[in-house]
Image (cartoon, helix red, strand yellow):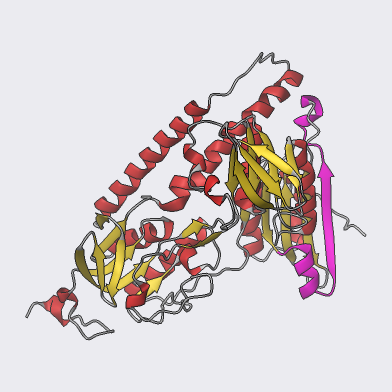
Amino acid sequence: MPACLLIVNSVKGIPVAEFDFDLFVIGAGSGGVRAGRMAAAMGVRVGMAEDRYLGGTCVNVGCVPKKLFVYGSHFSEEFENAAGFGWNVGKSSFDWPTLRDNKTKEIERLNGIYRNMLVNSGVNLIDGRAKIAGPNSVEVAGKVYTAERILIATGGWPYVPEFEGSEHVISSNEVFYLDEFPKRAIVVGGGYIAVEFAGIFAGLGAETSLIYRGDMFLRGFDQEVREFTAEEVAKKNVSLRFNNNIEKIEKLSDGSLLAHLTDGSTLAADTIMYATGRVPNVMDLGLDNIKLEQADNGAIVVNDQFETAEPSVYAIGDVIDRVQLTPVALAEGMALVRNLYDGQNQQVDYDLIATAVFCQPNIGTVGLSEEKSRELYTNVDVYKSTFRAMKHTISGSDEKTFMKMLVDRDSDKVLGVHMVGPDAGEIIQGIAVALKAGATKAVFDSTIGIHPTAAEEFVTMREPVS
């Protein structure tokens, strides 16, 4: 008997060699690709199936193309700001097909890189929709593959509520491929995607409205950050309509859309985009063929080792609905592979995860909000600063930057750091390392700043606000 047959599956007692693969990954997104590549590099026989987006949501209809659009939308403001610096830019115009198609070319380039990375690492990449046929089997395009372990990494999917006329709206999947750029756009929602795309539409020249059913968008962020961002976003030609919603959408004879709002008003648009959240992508995965627990929203329930109720099946990323961020899916994929195939006992640390919202201006944040800080700590000191960036002292723009730091007075530990302003994500990434290392306010105070930068404000705020 070959030596490989002595390795026995811990679930069924079936020799590994009787399976087609040691690990079969469903979904070639961020988490799935990272897990598959790492496992293959360790000598694990990996199969992977993807039917739509090689590289996942982030690469195809998420982070990457969105940020390219954010860059594109900011040029209109840069042209205006240039005058104060002596530049006569002249009349400018925007060509949507150029941005759209150049973005698509870049995504196709990245798709090719992902494919090559997977194949070169030894992953057997299978094109097609995978469906779980049993605890150790997966069907793709009519062919059944067996595997010792199955990893579900199918990510999330945009959620659009059903109502009269909802068939006329688009989601973040379609917005990157519009045939024509709208003159009038409505964005519905109050999260990252909604706020970011309101800025994108407005920056590219569309008359833009953001509708949100709550009294303030970006729920879960620091309240002052939310309020400051709303003020700045409103300066960027975005009409904010809080405490409102769409009851129905009527398609008019000229092809435009008429939104009937809950406050009794109507709003005309050429495009209406719903960014009302994302749900775990679990449709048609064959989950009924295994014993699995799911949350009310369909999220797959796993333990700290990403094991499901079916011992041979695992899940990571947005499909488990813990923290819906690409770097988190990557961390989960790496932890899983190290634990399964490298004898480690690693758990993902979900504490102090920094994040950014690429609205205009950007938001960067790490740690606790003021509201949460006061819930957990008795004595909280608040340091904050609002100022006009040096660039705008002669650009003519009235854009402001906001910075905030929360400190536990008793221990001097920094609890949270928040910023609204240009390059906030870049700045907060560095500060996240400091917080992860347990930095105190004294550490910030003893750090010499880089002058002149906005970032130096974080090491020069000396007095807490009353």
| Region of the chain picked out in magenta, as a range | 368-395
Q: Tell which residue pokes out farthest to the bottom in this image.
A: 13
> Residue 161 falls in which quadrant of the image?
bottom right
> Residue 287 falls in which quadrant of the image?
bottom left
Q: Tell which residue pokes out farthest to the front in this image.
A: 253
Q: Does the segment drawn in magenta span residue 102? A: no
Q: Nearer the viewer, residue 243 or 81?
A: 243
Residue at the (40%, 75%) spot, across then down: 344
Q: Tell which residue pokes out farthest to the left in this image.
A: 1
Q: Tell which residue pokes out farthest to the right in this image.
A: 466
Q: Is residue 358 visible?
A: no
Q: Does the segment drawn in magenta span residue 371? A: yes
Taking 345 as reference, is 22 left or right?
left
Residue at the (46%, 66%) spot, across then down: 319
> Residue 266 falls in which quadrant of the image?
top right
Query: Is residue 106 positioned above or below 245 on the image?
Result: above
Residue at the (68%, 55%) spot, across then down: 365
Query: Is residue 157 positioned above or below 101 on the image?
Result: below
Taking 268 as reference, is 136 left or right?
left
Residue at the (23%, 59%) spot, across then down: 141
Query: Is residue 378 positioned above or below 27 on the image?
Result: below
Quadrant housing the C terminus: bottom right
Query: Is residue 235 positioned above or below 370 on the image?
Result: above
Taking 123 as reference, is 213 left or right?
right
Whole-percent x, y for residue 369 in the image: 74, 63
Quadrant housing the N terminus: bottom left
